[in-house]
Amino acid sequence: MGYDRRKGIDIMVRKTNVVVQQKVRGGEGTVEFHHILKEEELYGHGKLYAKVVIKPHSSIGMHQHVGNTEPYYVLKGTGIFVDNDGSRTEVHTGDVCVIEPGQSHSMENNTDEDFEMMALIYNEAAK
């Protein structure tokens, strides 16, 4: 939620904030992050809620999740999910990928079309 100083009211509807990055986590090419919630709007429960668009022939490099988990929901396209041991699984619209705390993964788009997914990174429960 934002605040419009001119009108003195909270804004409950807004556009997503799009951030374009190159070579994300050591990957290749271009990835767009359409941030739905800001980190502070997750109130300490997580760090990312976004639509992620991996552009054609681009990837998010291998990285480990420490203290958090990240489910992906594939919205559009075909991609390659690479897990901890290097296993490669082709994923499609409607598939869900779940990365648990301590696990590593990467995601590749080796097609000529955009690959779109919803991503939520939320914190592991305190023990």
Image (cartoon, grey):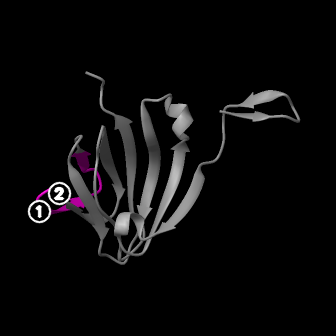
Quadrant position of residue 47: top left
Label 2 crowding class (10 Å Cα cut-off): few <14, some 14-19, many 20+? some
Q: Residue 6 location in percent, x, y?
A: 88, 36
Mark number, residue 76: none
Compared to residue 109, the image places residue 10 above or below, namely above
Report, in whole angstroms, how far the alpha carbon at label 1 lies from the one at label 2. Answer: 6 Å
Q: Is residue 25 left or right of residue 3?
A: left
Nearest the camera: 9 or 22?
22
Q: Is residue 88 left or right of residue 94?
A: left
Q: Which residues are magenta?
A: 84-98
Mark number, residue 83: 2
Residue in the image at 53% along x and 64% along y: 20
Spot the residue most to the top: 127
Tell me, yes or no, whether the highlighted magenta stretch contains residue 87: yes
Q: Residue 8 location in percent, x, y?
A: 84, 28
In contact (CB < 8 Å): disc 1 and disc 2:
yes
Mark number, residue 87: 1
